[in-house]
Image (spheres, coloured by chain):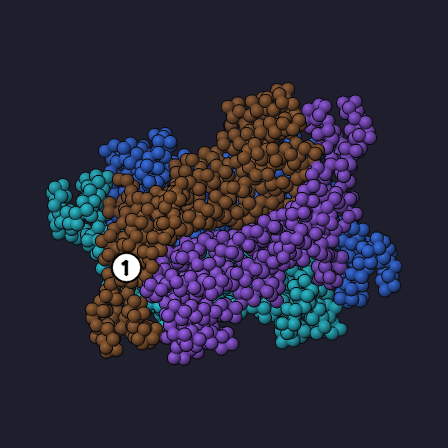
Chain colours: A brown, B blue, C cyan, D purple
Amino acid sequence: MLGHLFSSKAMKQVFSDEATLTRWLEVEAALASVQAGYGVMPEEAAVAIHNACSIDLYNLDELGQHIAKASHPLTPVIVAIENNAGEHGQYVHYGATTQDIMDTGMMLQIRDGLDLAIRAQGELVTTCTKQARKWRDLPMAGRTHGQHAVPITLGLKFALWASEANRHVVRLKALRSDLTVQFAGAAGTLATLGGDGARVRAGLARALCLKDPQESWHTTRDPIALIVSQLCISSATCGKIANEVVNLQRTEIGELAEGAAAGTGGSSTMPQKRNPMMAQNIAALARLMAAKPATALEAMMHEHERDMAALTLEWVVVPESFIYAHAALDQTVQLVSHIQVNKQRIAENLRATGGLICSEAVMMDLASDMGRSEAHHVIADIVAETVQSGTGFTDALCAHPQISKLRTREQIEALLEPENYLGEAVEVVDRIVRELEGSGP
Amino acid sequence: MLGHLFSSKAMKQVFSDEATLTRWLEVEAALASVQAGYGVMPEEAAVAIHNACSIDLYNLDELGQHIAKASHPLTPVIVAIENNAGEHGQYVHYGATTQDIMDTGMMLQIRDGLDLAIRAQGELVTTCTKQARKWRDLPMAGRTHGQHAVPITLGLKFALWASEANRHVVRLKALRSDLTVQFAGAAGTLATLGGDGARVRAGLARALCLKDPQESWHTTRDPIALIVSQLCISSATCGKIANEVVNLQRTEIGELAEGAAAGTGGSSTMPQKRNPMMAQNIAALARLMAAKPATALEAMMHEHERDMAALTLEWVVVPESFIYAHAALDQTVQLVSHIQVNKQRIAENLRATGGLICSEAVMMDLASDMGRSEAHHVIADIVAETVQSGTGFTDALCAHPQISKLRTREQIEALLEPENYLGEAVEVVDRIVRELEGSGP
Amino acid sequence: MLGHLFSSKAMKQVFSDEATLTRWLEVEAALASVQAGYGVMPEEAAVAIHNACSIDLYNLDELGQHIAKASHPLTPVIVAIENNAGEHGQYVHYGATTQDIMDTGMMLQIRDGLDLAIRAQGELVTTCTKQARKWRDLPMAGRTHGQHAVPITLGLKFALWASEANRHVVRLKALRSDLTVQFAGAAGTLATLGGDGARVRAGLARALCLKDPQESWHTTRDPIALIVSQLCISSATCGKIANEVVNLQRTEIGELAEGAAAGTGGSSTMPQKRNPMMAQNIAALARLMAAKPATALEAMMHEHERDMAALTLEWVVVPESFIYAHAALDQTVQLVSHIQVNKQRIAENLRATGGLICSEAVMMDLASDMGRSEAHHVIADIVAETVQSGTGFTDALCAHPQISKLRTREQIEALLEPENYLGEAVEVVDRIVRELEGSGP
Amino acid sequence: MLGHLFSSKAMKQVFSDEATLTRWLEVEAALASVQAGYGVMPEEAAVAIHNACSIDLYNLDELGQHIAKASHPLTPVIVAIENNAGEHGQYVHYGATTQDIMDTGMMLQIRDGLDLAIRAQGELVTTCTKQARKWRDLPMAGRTHGQHAVPITLGLKFALWASEANRHVVRLKALRSDLTVQFAGAAGTLATLGGDGARVRAGLARALCLKDPQESWHTTRDPIALIVSQLCISSATCGKIANEVVNLQRTEIGELAEGAAAGTGGSSTMPQKRNPMMAQNIAALARLMAAKPATALEAMMHEHERDMAALTLEWVVVPESFIYAHAALDQTVQLVSHIQVNKQRIAENLRATGGLICSEAVMMDLASDMGRSEAHHVIADIVAETVQSGTGFTDALCAHPQISKLRTREQIEALLEPENYLGEAVEVVDRIVRELEGSGP
């Protein structure tokens, strides 16, 4: 009932049982075809096996029962293909080991998974870039340690998200172009094929549009661990964005709000509630992902030439990582593109401290006359007094004997104007928008 | 297709969508019934709600779609109950918050889950105890750092597993008896019920056979984290046992073997293979579990009075922990009860080092005459020489000038007899068997 | 330079090199003494070994170099004791294996560590209880999903923390009373000691005030994993409390503030900043702890009769867990005891939504007349309208045709008074304070 | 005392307090110098600050006490520099925020850390390549699921390690070339510097030989998470290699042994023991590393414009990751370069199953006549019979009615010769050696 929270339909389908079996059949068919090309088997056998590898011929439930009974993930599939291939059945799975088929099948699924992830990640870049351009110069309170620091613009926040998301696009694409076929035989030597091994592996790679690793990777799983790591890192970015929305939607802050169709985000008991349900869910997904690399790293520590105790971990961690990561990306795209911005609350909050948010501006300005350190002390004293007494910061600054000699009230008021203390915020937004616009999916 | 590797049917059912909904309905029905008892609602309303809470009235797929659409996990369920309760619908979910129902429902599922876990854990105690008694005094090589150390008995290995498994039984039972109802309202004050809150919560606890926490635990999730931790610890024990079987089944060791019905554990390409498939799978399950506490601990860090970003983590980590842990326990029971013991290989391995495995025995015996430290040096020198030259250890000992003055060949041969150097192995087995027999499920 | 953030002096000392060596010496001395009692060695030997086990005789740096050179953690220590014990050196470490000494030494350190943890945990109970009593009935906004929900009292927040912290005290004490001696010899059979093994182990347990496990726990590490788990769970509670302070100290909320001596929590550049530095640090500690159980669980999966690859993990995870957990507890005690409460901001925030925080109160009151569901709809509509139009909630309620027939303005105003909708908040505080006062350290 | 197990001296030094402070001073000095270049401060100020940033002027212990007292990691350092810079002190830390200095300092340490890691990783490639060439064609048992599978060569094992290690070199170098300066001011806008911000940042990047990020990365920590991930992945490879040695050194296998200077790897009680202490330690290090990404991912989830609760995590996880990873790499280089190969045991094990290890060879050979599937059945039956009856595999094959018609005893004996069934093992070794030789550090 709650599955939609943790998965997108598209990615669930990539790693569904049906897709998995389809990929295995695809690999077995391609293997036969390539081997026929090199004379390892007769052409007719490859045709028969190709026909026998149609997903329509298989009943998933039935096969699942055979697999459970046989305590072997692939043998029942091979037997079924053999049966369907009739007299040519003997050529099915020729020279391959179980892991060759499963690893290559997984690579094909990873390719599909990366395609979906790259697309969603690209959409996140696009939507953040759009928001960055839209809110390019809206001043808002910058916060550090949860406290007002100095002003920023809302556009800067979105722009930095876009920039981070875009780095993920680049990394995901690099991983996408590095996927390899697995064909190495029982212990990585391809001894079954005599001298034909290397050629068949290369041919299989071409047939499936994967790279030829030129060696076995039965026990060298670093590429898988890298992919899982990057998916987790992508998800952490989503988690950060979502968490930011949850924080800025707090009743007392109210600057952003999760956009919602009617009826969502409400409470079963409190009529006034409007909860950032999706943002909270994304934050949870990012936390779920944080536990995945530990498993992927364990899975790297294979023993000897093949090791089921380690390999099995990938059968869980790879699909789950793709599914959670895509759910996080997908939901974050929705979150950012439908975000509601409350300009009034943003302005109110920015001015709520009566100029304290610009105390650094005053300090830096005075620093040119009295030194940074002295200026820090003077302003800090005034701030403390102001907070204690409740008098206005502007008045206190103007009344200070040292400052009043150096600056007019007009000057001080200008220093306390947030718009005047945005530094390079807008320039950074512009550069990022310029670089990323048009880089979308 | 591979789901059977990671789950038992029984535990999957406990946390199935149907079971989850059934529990929620059960809680809503019980709540109405208790409230009617205290006059919060009319008796007829409770009856109507009770009738409306029959699982047969609900279509899971349909409800799932409503839940996804509403972005709320429970509201559509409440609406459905209200509809089914007709004019009494207004009393459904009276004074409760969503999390009250979901938490209490989860507690009921945890109770079922613990019952299954306790039973399987108890069976592991029983089967290990049986094996301990059976192999009580079969001498075998004790190994440390992967190297032969001194002799133990096979029974001792099983007995220590039984003892560890039994500690888990005790802990799981303690957790089982500590499960509480959740009924706290919107922010933990039960303000909805005026003065009736505490009484209704206590009544609800009695009705559902849970404990009354006397306070809200909306944000105090330590009991959940404890339960997950213990399930992980139980699973680590399974992982250790399974890993031991994988190691002792190695071709070169061959002392234990995973018992298997015909056809299982074979290879798709190597006719001679017999693989410890189940043991490797259990080892993988234990590793999957090792990543769970991080999530359960994150889930403890709720914000304010309720926090969906944290709570959502439990919806994943609790079912998964129970499902993996029970799969691990279930499979380990099978593994241990059908384990094949190769007495011949055990005996061969024990004697393979020509007595070196008892070098400590000789050293300790000589220590009484020449001091432990001197004896260690003398024996270490002889061992080094023996290994280098290939001469027999017994002969080298007998030929040593110092030793030959102190011990006869007969004495030395007796010292090198593994059966004579078992220490308290058998006594420990006997004590554990005595304590644990009859403690089974 | 930053070590103080992650450790307390007291706990660092418990796990210092000096303390570790002291414990090892203590175990070797006690072993000799017990063995002399059972006639395993002459009385004079025990006396000589006892004298040789004085920490003052050892130079840690020198010993460290020998240990590194020997690639063995204990042998150089034994050799040094032997040298110091002169002619009786041969009786040093009699019948023991390295792990016996190191495990027992670690247990003594764990005992000290638990004592410190229990004390700090108890202080957390005390200080939370005090604050709960102090702020027993101060109404404040209860928040769920980061949004105002219904009122609570500040005392309730503290009381629930006290209750959670107190459960940890109980659990830590239970773990404290369950620590065992390790004395099992090379492979867990104590074969070195002939028939004396069990008696010596029991005697050693008594001498060191530990429990006698009556078996080897060289490879059954579940008690260690349990201890680490509980320390992590305790730390997660600290993390939650600290995170709450960070949130309630936000500029826009300002209800709580980390108490600070002059000069702390400031910024190197912004004069107005006052940052919750300690609270943020505690939150970080809790997150560091969340990764520890994975390692402790890995450490459970020992191979055979002893396994350094697994045991080594404990040498890192046990000290680190105690050190981080105690730092977290210690800092949380300081945080809670010096917390600054801003009653004005609490009152302002509570009323900031113009009564919306009590919309549930109105709904439940009306529910008795129009049903819960209908009341929810009516109030939700009014809330939506209010938020949109900016008119007051009270006025909107009074103006509503249905409501105006059922309730007077006076009644509505009373319903919107937070003090009137605190449910059982104060009763829960009172019960918890009553139970926990006097339970301190 | 046990620190050498978990760290190398070189990497410990990179992240020592002294190195950290040195880096901070270096950054402050460079900042002043760059700012003088752009007229932000007078030349004399930059000179004075440069002189004041000499590490010799600082007492680490004293500074540490100030830091602890101030509850601020950097302010006491700035004050100390100011004091040392005399009248020019006001220009110290001009326009920077604490995190600018600490982040940039960390980047410089990361650069040093990566240099060390790249060197050690490169040495691992070199040493594995050398071993691959040396043992290029030594046949040994290939193992899958812990069971003999088909023959490989020892060189292949080393070659695949070299190939994996080399991928890490490439990745580490890519990370090395991507390190950026941090200079962004209080909230990422560099408002303190008016229009000079971007130029100063670019200048600072050039001065420190880091990249200019052109934006703030105060809260975008994905590069850090990536670096930690890769260090963990590198360590997992070490763990795999080490674990392989532990396994192949088992008493019953005895094919490899950790090379050791006299006296190491022994037991405190068993004179015959020779333990793979270093290999076990590396395995432990790899497991410790597996828990690190969870923390690095948490650290990515910064709030707002800076967030100490997240940043603090990096101060622990970054140094620890480098220190553990380098210890693992360093020890693995030693392990592989001094590995002892027991050719006799390798040959004995290879032949221990009387040809069963080549049953696939026979099957594939017969497959050309009777089909793969039929051949699998026939051979599987003979294997089962052989194992049960104890008769020789060769004899059983020769005696089989179907096989005897198709193959002579000579042919069968040739098929069972491991040297004849090595597939592309040697070719793969040659290719990898060719590619990687000369790629060393």
Point out the image quarter for the C terminus of chain A.
top left
Which residue is the site of mark 1?
A: C252
Q: Is residue C303 left or right of residue C262?
A: right
Q: Residue furthest bottom?
A: D86
Residue D104's spot in the image, x, y percent? 46, 63
- Tell me which corner region of the image, top left, top right, bottom left or bottom right, holds residue A147: bottom left
Residue B195, percent across and down? Answer: 25, 50
Query: Looking at the image, which is closer to me, C333 or D441?
Result: D441
The answer, for residue B157, to whether it is visible in the render is: no
Residue ID at (43%, 52%): B298
Relative height, residue A157 to residue B100 (above, below): below
Chain letter belonging to callout 1:
C
Find residue D140 and report its image quarter.
top right
Q: Nearer the viewer, residue C49 or C260?
A: C260
Q: Residue at x 34, y 73 (%)?
A: A372
Residue C133 location, quadrant: bottom left
A50 is higher (above) or lower (below) than C181: above
